[in-house]
Amino acid sequence: MIPRSTRGRDRGVFTLVLACACLPLSAAVTLERHDGTVDVLVDGQPFTSYVFTGHRKPILFPVHGPGGVAMTRSWPMVEGVAGEAHDHPHHESIWFTHGLVNGVDFWVSDPRAVKAERQGADRIEHVELVRTESGDEGVIESKNRWVKADGTVVCTDATRLVFGGDAATRTIECTVTIHADHGPLVFGDTKEGTMGIRVPTPLQLKDLHGSKGAAGHCTNSEGQRDDDVWGKAARWVGYWGPIGGKTVGIAVLDHPDNLRHPTHWHARDYGLVAANPFGLHDFTGAAKGTGDHTIPAGGSLTLRYLFVFHEGDSAAAGIEDRWQRWAKGDR
């Protein structure tokens, strides 16, 4: 028998233990450095790789969600995946670029420029891995330079990636600080940007560009759905659909400290999801140039986003609640 004087205390301890048991448990994140990549594992299982050579910009590929399912399109990195469209070859899994920086197209919306990359083109070059750290979270910090085809450096960036996970989710927090260390910078008013992900075919809203198997939906923090999400301002956007007999989803969250938060979204029915604070002309009909943003020489601009790969749709995954917690400093 439990003594009367300790019963209440023991019940409290039991309640606390039970509550803790119901919370998702963080998983160990391990980083493995190789030539040109840093592999990210969650509890020993592949999550993603930071790939900083062989492409016109650093990318994250592949990306595995809960249960190991692929959460981004494989093409053009991998050929022959059934049902995948072969459009927009510059949509490489997860990436950060912009289509108009001092007049230079680092996004590459022009197919002729994509072809030109084989001989050298405007690009974001990896300079240095500053930090790779394993633990309850994995951290990669890197430096990059934005370079014109003729070798002229336009600017540099410092990128910080933080990886996490538990039994039901995987997360990537991406913070990019652009440094105007080679003169003033103008990030121009174009829809072609900026923090992008290309979702797998089952999460697309429609079968376009030759894809087969689209069965997805999307919504945003404002309650707009599917085609109505494109160009709208929102705290977050989420896509979900059936993969391997289960509903899984992707959400991209815009941090409240970001320029022009809540950002506008270049979110397409064929599977592109991109947060873009600059493309106001295309998204709102404002006069061209309204979305231009100048970083003075010696200045900087920091943009921060959170990717959440989850089970269920956006509501079941509690994306709005996650955004509220993240905005207060809790991933």
Image: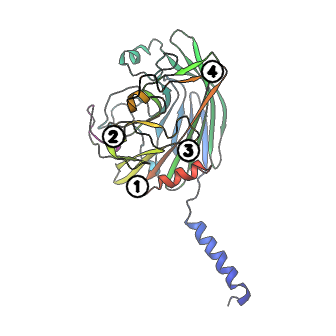
Q: Nearer the viewer, residue 311 or 218?
A: 218
For the residue carrying disc 2, how many other residues have a C-alpha within 10 Å: few (<14), some (14-19), or many (20+)? many
Tell me if 170 is positioned left or right of 114 in this view.
right
- Label whose residue precedes the other's in the sequence (3 or 1): 3
Residue type indicated by callout 3: Leu
- Spatial separation of the CA atoms under disc 2 and disc 3: 24 Å
- The answer for how far apart the CA atoms under marks 3 and 1 are is 22 Å
| Marking on residue 312 | 1
Q: Is residue 206 magenta?
A: yes
Earlier-in-chain disc, 2 versus 3: 3
As drawn, the label of residue 41 is: 3
Residue lying at the far top in this picture: please name it: 150
Q: Choose the circle earlier in sequence order: 2 or 1.
A: 2
Give the numbered dot on residue 201.
Answer: 2
The segment highlighted magenta reads 203-212
Which image quarter is the N terminus in?
A: bottom right
How many residues crowd around disc 3 within 10 Å: few (fewer than 14), some, or many (20 or more)? Answer: many
Mark in front: 4 vs 1 = 4
